């Protein structure tokens, strides 16, 4: 990564490269919401920004908005909401804003002091073209020509460098504004046709939300149907299943389909920090002698403001925190730490667990009342080994997503590599598959992922119960078969063309094809394989 904050010489190429990738990921023909999310990821990965937040207004529904964010530190993008004062000023004035020092700004109250001392902040308007070609003036979408704001947390830097980033981000704001017009059209079309949409058949693929990549297997389609049924309810939801099965992702699908979709989705990993910090993040803290806090801070349940609070690994909560969560579910109120004042909150509780909550109840580590309160909508997410039909579509989705974000041109997965992916039993589930495809795309210097790009665990059968690594002769034979199959597939079964592509004689290719029992007719168009 080029650190564009270090010098103007580094900034130019970094800005240009990031703009090229942002245009690519948000261009026509791509899913708009996914493209906007990928654009934020590009800003973080290419320029070293700590956190990026995009807020879009002027959507078809009155008062509707969409908030997307991405952070360099895992979980940071969901721990803090958008900066409402800064964004409001930028949208209202149609002018960008730079905060070289954020420690005394009210939008950043509650951040750790050591973080505040190292941050600067930039916020720019997200703009759409107007009839006269300028942002100012009338726009049929937004009279101001401004449809939202893009805010950036970045390492503290001199004002001259922050000005350079502000100018760059103003251009990005225009690109994202154009993409938001397509998103507006999609939402408008969806809103107008939703009422007349037919009820899906029991075995038909579930309706997929904007950020749902695949739903091939019957088991995951059932989960998606259950999510659709629970989406508009205010009752809590509990996702259960092994680690890495995608419980958080499905919780986001629930959020995107429900009547709270325009409000925040705030996540907290209950085992990612000490329980005292978990209590502060969830319920807030009131400054004073009792709490020893020097400033007051709202918790996630207050910040959610009609949205969803997602509690990952809820079994890690202390009994005291569990009791407070139960109170939110039953009464809709919280008390900040150090305060006796009751605060009304409107937040739907969605939780996830990979542990046996029944065992935890038996050991007195999990409240029985909370277990049954969460069980109103308890959804089981099957492991990847029980939904084999999803492996290849998911692998292709992750490969395309990573390739787009990094600017690589990895297009497909070879047949032998597909066989390895299908034979492995994936103890780490979808998360392991995503990491596997990211590794493959990183190592791949051509358009096709091959077996040797996959992790050693897939190639040796380690932790999957298959045979150990191949001998040298067997490995050579496997590689030859892979090359022959790929060449015949590309040549559509034409042996002469395959030989030319391999830069080998027809006689040798014919011999190898017979040796390995490969039928070239399998690859002829129109022939069933």
Image (spheres, helix red, strand yellow):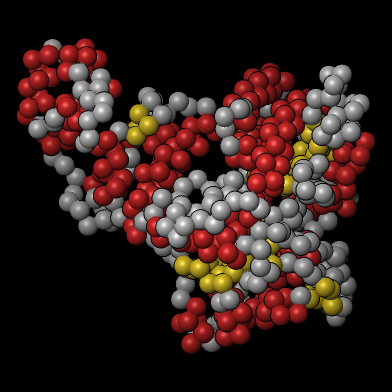
> Looking at the image, can residue 187 be seen?
no
Residue 83, horizontal then vertical, whole percent: 81, 48
In the picture shown, does residue 505 fall above or below 406?
A: above
Q: Residue at x 28, y 22 (%)?
A: 490
Near-viewer residue (466 or 92): 92
Quadrant in the picture for residue 322: bottom right
Question: Is residue 67 visible in this depiction of the protein?
Answer: yes
Q: Identify the residue at image location x=13%, y=31%.
A: 518
Q: Nearer the viewer, residue 313 or 137?
A: 137
Where, quadrant-wise, is the N terminus in this rendering?
Answer: top right
Q: Position of residue 167 (x, y in %)?
A: 79, 25
The quadrant in which the C terminus is found is top left
How many numbered circles are shown? 0
In this view, 61 is above or below 163: below
- Seen in the image, is 390 located left or right of residue 300? left
**490 lies above or below 250:** above
| In-image side of 497 versus 276 (left or right) | left
Q: Which residue sits at x=39%, y=54%?
A: 217
Taking depth in this image into account, of 279 and 56 the one nearest to the observer is 56
Residue 72: x, y in percent? 63, 44
Considering depth in this image, is 34 or 123 the residue closer to the camera?
34
Please tell me which residue is depicted at 37% across the width and 24% down the height of the picture. 446
- In percent of width and height, residue 109 lies at 83, 56
Q: Is residue 416 left or right of residue 287?
A: left
């Amino acid at each position: 990564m080029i650190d564009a904050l270090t010098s103007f010489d580094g900034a130019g190429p970094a800005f240009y490269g990031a703009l090229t990738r942002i245009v690519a990921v948000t261009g026509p023909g791509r899913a708009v919401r996914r493209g906007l999310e990928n654009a934020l990821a590009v800003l973080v990965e290419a320029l070293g920004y700590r956190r990026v937040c995009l807020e879009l207004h002027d959507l078809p529904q009155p008062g509707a908005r969409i908030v997307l964010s991405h952070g360099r530190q895992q979980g940071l993008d969901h721990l803090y909401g958008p900066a409402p004062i800064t964004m409001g000023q930028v949208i209202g004035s149609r002018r960008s804003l730079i905060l070289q020092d954020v420690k005394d700004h009210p939008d950043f109250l509650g951040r750790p002091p050591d973080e505040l001392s190292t941050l600067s902040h930039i916020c720019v308007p997200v703009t759409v073209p107007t009839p006269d070609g300028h942002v100012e003036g009338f726009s049929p979408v937004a009279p101001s020509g401004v449809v939202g704001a893009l805010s950036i947390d970045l390492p503290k830097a001199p004002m001259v460098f922050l000005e350079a980033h502000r100018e760059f981000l103003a251009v990005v704001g225009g690109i994202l504004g154009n993409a938001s017009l397509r998103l507006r059209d999609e939402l408008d079309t969806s809103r107008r046709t939703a009422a007349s949409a037919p009820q899906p058949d029991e075995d038909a693929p579930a309706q997929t939300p904007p950020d749902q990549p695949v739903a091939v297997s019957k088991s995951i389609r059932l989960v998606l149907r259950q999510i659709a049924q629970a989406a508009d309810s205010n009752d809590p939801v509990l996702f259960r299943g092994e680690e890495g099965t995608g419980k958080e992702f499905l919780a986001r699908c629930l959020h995107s389909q429900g009547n709270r979709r325009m409000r925040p989705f705030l996540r907290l990993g209950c085992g990612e920090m000490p329980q005292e910090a978990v209590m502060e993040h969830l319920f807030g803290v009131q400054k004073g002698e009792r709490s020893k806090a020097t400033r007051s801070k709202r918790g996630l349940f207050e910040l959610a403001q009609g949205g969803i609070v997602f509690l990952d690994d809820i079994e890690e909560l202390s009994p005291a925190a569990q009791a407070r969560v139960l109170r939110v579910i039953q009464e809709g109120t919280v008390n900040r730490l150090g305060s006796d004042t009751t605060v009304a909150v409107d937040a739907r509780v969605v939780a996830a667990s990979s542990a046996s909550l029944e065992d935890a109840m038996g050991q007195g580590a999990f409240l029985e009342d909370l277990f049954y309160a969460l069980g109103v909508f308890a959804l089981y997410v099957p492991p990847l080994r029980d939904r084999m039909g999803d492996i290849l579509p998911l692998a292709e989705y992750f490969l395309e997503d990573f390739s787009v974000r990094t600017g690589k041109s990895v297009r497909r997965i070879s047949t032998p590599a597909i066989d390895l992916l299908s034979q492995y039993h994936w103890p780490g589930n979808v998360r392991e598959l995503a990491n596997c495809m990211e590794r493959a795309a990183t190592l791949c210097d051509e358009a096709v992922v091959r077996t040797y790009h996959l992790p050693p665990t897939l190639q040796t059968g380690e932790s999957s119960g298959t045979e150990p690594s191949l001998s040298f002769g067997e490995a050579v034979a496997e590689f030859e078969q892979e090359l022959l199959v790929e060449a015949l597939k590309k040549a559509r079964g034409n042996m002469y063309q395959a030989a030319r592509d391999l830069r080998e004689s027809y006689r040798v290719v014919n011999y190898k094809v017979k040796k390995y029992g490969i039928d070239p007719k399998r690859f002829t168009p129109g022939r069933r394989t």
